[in-house]
Image: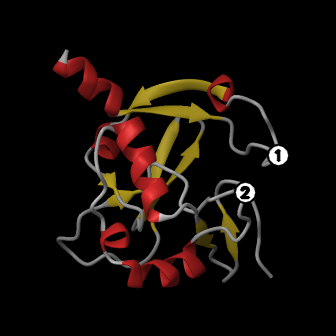
Amino acid sequence: LELAYKEQMNTYGLYYNHFPLDSSLDKKKLMFGFGFYLVLSLTNHSCMPNLYKRRKGTTIDLVALHDIPEGTELCHSYIDLNENTNQRRNVLSQCYGFYCKCERCEDENVDMDFVLEHVCPDTRCGGLLIHEEEGTQICIKCGYEPN
């Protein structure tokens, strides 16, 4: 049973790229597969991630959001990032079985800077804003591009 739980917690769903923000569609119905990704399973969750996942077909690339000092734990977010600390912790506890103690959850002072720089301003989305090579930003969930 323990092995089955570990397998469930370390497999990743493959979903179609974007969901309409006002859609009532069940996202699970939009999943076209799942996979076990060894390197990805070695990363952990943070509500202030230093990585994001970029899917190309059935391949998942891990891309750094910024320079990551040697020895730093590699983390991506398992959830949308626009909720408050209690809401994020509840989702993580119910869906992933742990109480989040990441830097953002433990220190509310770091929260606003991270949100302003890396969380999609569309309150319905909660996706991660990434910096493109041209100096622009784009939300990896909804495709929003701030001016």
Give yes or no for contact between labels 2 and 1 (Cβ–Cβ under 8 Å).
Answer: yes
> Horizontally, is 113 left or right of 90 in the view?
right
- SS assignment at label 1: loop
**Residue nearer the viewer, 38 or 119:** 119
**Residue nearer the viewer, 102 or 17:** 102
- Above or below residue 2? Residue 137 is below
Residue bearing the label numbered 1? 22
> Pointer 1: residues within 10 angstroms few (<14), some, or many (20+)?
few
Q: Position of residue 15 (x, y in %)?
A: 62, 34
- Above or below residue 50? Residue 19 is above
Q: Position of residue 41 (x, y in %)?
A: 30, 41
Q: Which residue is painted at 44% across and 63% down in the image?
A: 85
Can residue 62 be seen by looking at this rendering?
A: no
Q: Which residue is painted at 59% across and 43% down in the image?
A: 56
> Pointer 2: residues within 10 angstroms few (<14), some, or many (20+)?
few
Distance from disc 2 to disc 1, alpha carbons, whole Å, reads: 8 Å
Q: Position of residue 23 (x, y in %)?
A: 81, 39
Q: Position of residue 118 (x, y in %)?
A: 56, 73
Can residue 38 be seen by looking at this rendering?
A: yes
Residue bearing the label numbered 2? 124
Tell which circle, 2 or 1, labels the residue nearer the N-terminal end.
Answer: 1
Q: In the orientation shown, which residue stands out farthest toward the front?
A: 86
